[in-house]
Amino acid sequence: MKAVVFTRAPRDVQRLPMFKGRAAREIEIRPMADLRKSLASLAEAPLVCLDVRGLAEKERTRLLSMISTHQQLRFCVLDPAGAIKDVAAVFHAGAIDYLGKGVTGKALTAKRRAAAQAFAERLGLGPVTGKATDNAADAPQPAADAWAGIEQGREYTFAFLLIEVDDAEELKKRHEPANLAAAMETFREFVERIVCQHGGRLWMWSRFGGLVLFPLREQGSLAPLCALRILLSSVFYDIEESLLPGRLSFRMALSIGSTIYREADTGRIVSDAVNSIFHLGRRFARPGQFMITSEAHEMVPQPMRGLFVPVGTFEGRRILRMLRPSSALGMREGVDAWST
Amino acid sequence: MKVSSRLASLFVSALSQSMPVELMQKVARMVIQNYDIYERSGFPPAIPIPRADAARHILKDFMAEGYFLKLIEALIEVTSRGNMGREVRMPLLTRIIAEVEDQGYHYSAANGIFVEAGGRERTMGWGTLREGRTYEFALLRADIVGNSEMVRRYPRAVISEAYASVREMVTRLVERRDGRIWGWEGDGGLAAFYFLDKTIQATLCGMEIVHELFIYNLLGRTLPEPLRVRLAVHAGPCRFLSSVKESSGDTIKRVELLEARFTQPCCLTVSPGVFTDLGSKLSPLFAAVSGPENSTVYRYALGWEKR
């Protein structure tokens, strides 16, 4: 999600821990003086961020009111000093997030960004542009309302994507718990970033992996493309983001099924589909593999289907496996060129 | 960069309040070698120049020669490292930096220079390189294979749309890694990377293009056949000219040669110098192949395991 930050102190914004590292590429900093003239041209900006440092209350209110008149925009408030006493007023003015003292001191997670977007969707604030950094621009974007209308406590059909790090026990032996936890957090952020770009949400996530949901619509789901991008991008994760010394191996499994959707307390959910995807990922898939059920394979775009090979049946279902790219295999050269 | 009267006055105050004329001259010489304040101002060397006058002369000279930002960078360096083991304090420097940043630049502490901020139009020299000067760059060359045949085979509008998609993809991936497209002509172009880890960034960018092109050809292409691109990375000194057509030099020629003669379609080739920078996680992904003049170059290809 690209955010445009309007500020009187660009340098201070860059120094905020929340905008360090990769996040720095996902923001664009503009001087506060440009706010008015920029608003009209920002129709495509996914998020406007107003840095309220140094603004008197009257000025702050005026600027918030000015932004809120542009209904095509979603905006949030950046308040690292905690100057705003009445935080609720920010939301009353139409903001979708408040980034206060407690948030700006650490990296801004994709989960937080997704939560803000979800909040906006629930309130019907501004459009989801779907415009994102990284690889998303080329990706077919999910329907704007992919998650709209999905209510907690009701049953829906989803594409389930299980992602789990291999050899968790070995990693636990080799690394200090705190270091390993930090390393796994970077992996979660890597997965979440790509998942969000493809209309999915991390649903159940523990230390070494979890389950991602993609709502199914008439046009299908971007889950297979998402999994392919995770696989292809993992080489960049290993080089640029991973805190572990070697390549991080993980397995994936994709299926279609129904479950009651609940955002919290997911441990109480009883669902055959959820059990089944965990079985497929943990008992059938081997390290580094990506397995897919034949039902899920039917929603794979036709040109991509050739990347999968049948590997037998599991729990009464036909299973296919995606061929592994040379980049994921750590090979100097692919052994078979894929003809498109 | 245009220096506003407010910034000019701030600069003169900051300099004259914080350092003696000798130190001002020393800072000035960090940017313009042999800069002599007496010679430039016309003051006889025997007469001490008032600090404010010296600061004004330095400002005038550096603005005239287009080195104002470089001077601020030198001031930042002196205030952060000190001078001859002594601390140099310049309380107004923060305000000067803020003023410069308000004009669309941001100070990159990692590189010690001002570069254009994201909101500004991107220039080929990141807002900081000087025309005609020689710098070390990592260059990424991209070229669509079989352009002549494709132009003959498909209507112009169809080809234009497909090529525009590739250009947009390459531009997006290059700029995401703080690179700049230096030139693009129909079927290919040249991108430059200048900052820290430039060879790694150029190489990763090339690999990303290989991956994204694979997905584009699989799911998003508009032509009946896939678009195939050859990519090459080479690093070395290069004269910076805003007209890339006038640019030549060994580094550009070398990357063009690597791309045209030693790169297979849908592959990335890097020169030996670039390969040595890649590190233990990245280099195993590259295969050694024959290069120009009996040298070895290194190739990255996205292949798939056998069925």
Image: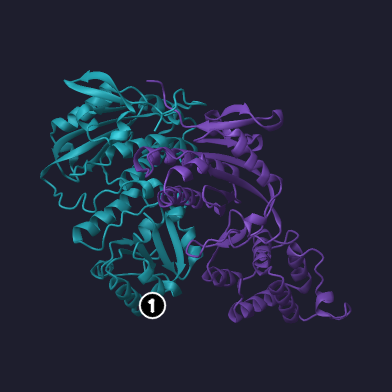
Q: Is residue B214 left or right of residue B131?
A: left
Q: How many marks?
A: 1
Can residue B279 be seen here? The reply is: yes
Query: Coloured how?
Result: by chain
Camera-side residue: A40 or A248? A40
Q: Color used for chain B?
A: purple
Q: Residue at x 21, y 22 (%)?
A: A318
Q: Residue furthest top?
A: A312
Label 1, residues with CA under 10 Å away: few <14, some 14-19, many ≥20 = few
Q: Where is residue B137 drawn, in percent x and y?
A: 64, 49
In which quadrant will I find the C terminus of chain B? top left
Image quarter for residue A182?
Answer: top left
Numbered disc 1: secondary structure: loop
Q: Nearer the viewer, residue A259 or A303?
A: A303
Q: Is residue B143 above or below residue A309?
A: below
Name which residue lies at 37% across and 64% down: A49
Q: Is residue B240 left or right of residue A126?
A: right
Q: Which color has been applied to chain A in this rendered view? A: cyan
Of all residues shown, which one is farthest toward the front?
A: B152
List the residue tagged with mark 1: A56
Q: Nearer the viewer, residue A298 or A278?
A: A298
**Residue B86 sits in quarter:** bottom right
Residue A18 location (% of width, % of height): 42, 55
Return the residue nearer the eye: A133 or A183.
A133
Residue B18 vs A294, above or below: the answer is below
